[in-house]
Image: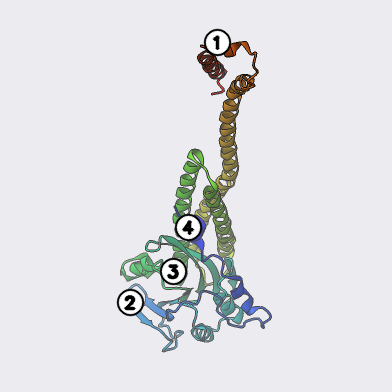
Amino acid sequence: MKIFSRHLKKVIPPSKKRKEGVGLPPGTLIYTGDKIKEKTKIKVTDYNEEFYEFQEFEDIQKDLTAIKKGVTRWIDIHGLAEVNVIEEIGRQFNLHPLVLEDILSTNQLPKFEDYGKYIFIIMRKLIWNEEEDEFDFEQTSLILGENYVISLQERDTNLFDPIYERIRVPKGRVRSMKADYLYYVLIDIIVDNYFIVLEKLGEEIENIEDILIKSPDPVTLQLIYGLKKSTIELRKSIWPIREVINKLQREQSSLLGDELQIYLRDIYDHIFRISDLLENNREIVFGMLDMYLSSVSNRMNDIMKVLTIISTIFIPLSFLAGFYGMNFKYMPEFSQPSAYPILIIIMILIAIVMLYYFRRKRWL
């Protein structure tokens, strides 16, 4: 059985990476995430109800701000290690240096910022890696402009593949809506993946509960502490999203249409349900520590009870063996030919009577 905390190995970057930007001026661009060898990929999707075009390249070959009238552009960037690409994106779309710094600092908690001409959101994306049988937990930045959406991911994952499929469908809802709806769809698919996390967490909790009931051991305690750490990290990632969506709902911005409010309320409802499930699982995990201590204590009590009963049975037997082991010359029993078998029978009867008594008292 895997320890659940191992599934979240990408949640907290090493402290050494966090210290790289300490003392530098605000807006200094340093990538603090994992040094992935994959080159940065830029996927550009232009669409409206009648038009669809997809392009993919590894460097910025043109002005990405040149968007046709009535067309929505989605710029999906995979890989943040090439800082010059992110810097060029910021220059073209006139992004604030602090926004670029937050994008490259991959240990950020979920946050919401409105810069007037664009809205900036940071979320933590959590997806299940079937090949590695573990969770990939990484930061995703989303920027909404007047007729464009920019998503920036640490690695090339398949989380957004269903969205690409929906955009390819000519009569799909995404094609008929504006950029704010695409922004909602990206947020929604990230949030929905948390249900998968909680499902896996629930399975892990059930497995460990079975172990606790049957045969708890020190390894089980490590599993519980792994679950405890995982739930804490999940809580840190999920709870701030409630405030992000709440701010997005209340935001009076021309970038967000009135028809989007119903969809944002749906996301908020999902986040509320996820938070409630997470809190329930968190309470169960914390209670499992008490359950482990109780199970170990009960197991120890059973062992001590058996040992005590064995010791109690052997006390009179040891007394008789010691008494007749003194070998005094004039002990009358020594002269009897049947003394030895009689003593053995007496000792056996004493043991049987004591076992019957313990059984009747339900101590056995």
Task: Identify the residue shown where x is 63% and y is 20%.
Answer: 327
Q: Position of residue 290 (x, y in %)?
A: 60, 42
Q: CA distance from mark 1 to mark 2?
A: 115 Å
Query: Which type of secondary structure does the marked residue at label 2 adopt?
Result: loop
Tell me where residue 61 appears, x and y as whole percent: 41, 89
Pointers 2 and 4 in contact (C-beta within 8 Å): no
Identify the residue at image location x=47%, y=48%.
Answer: 202
Most distant residue in the front direction: 329
Residue tagged 4: 194
| Residue nearest the observer in this picture, 31 or 114 | 31
Q: Which mark is residue 182?
A: 3
Give residue 24's position: percent from left, percent from top: 66, 82
For discs 1 and 2, the disc positioned in front in the rendered view: 1
Question: Does 123 sit left or right of 189 as displayed?
Answer: right
Marks 1 and 2, the one that precedes in the sequence: 2
Q: Nearer the viewer, mark 4 or mark 3?
A: 4
Q: Amino acid at mark 1?
A: Gln
Contact, mark 4 vs mark 1 (Cβ under 8 Å): no
Q: Foreground residue, 206 or 238?
A: 206
Callout 4–callout 3 Cβ contact below 8 Å: no
Quarter-of-image position of residue 23: bottom right
Q: Determine whether the residue tagged by mark 4 lies in a helix, strand or loop.
A: helix
Q: Is residue 264 visible in this depiction of the protein?
A: no
Q: Amino acid at mark 4?
A: Tyr
Q: Residue at x 32, y 71 (%)?
A: 168
Q: Are marks 3 and 1 in contact (CB under 8 Å)?
A: no
Q: Residues within 10 Å of mark 4 (few under 14, many from 20)?
A: many
Residue 336: which numbered mark, if any? 1
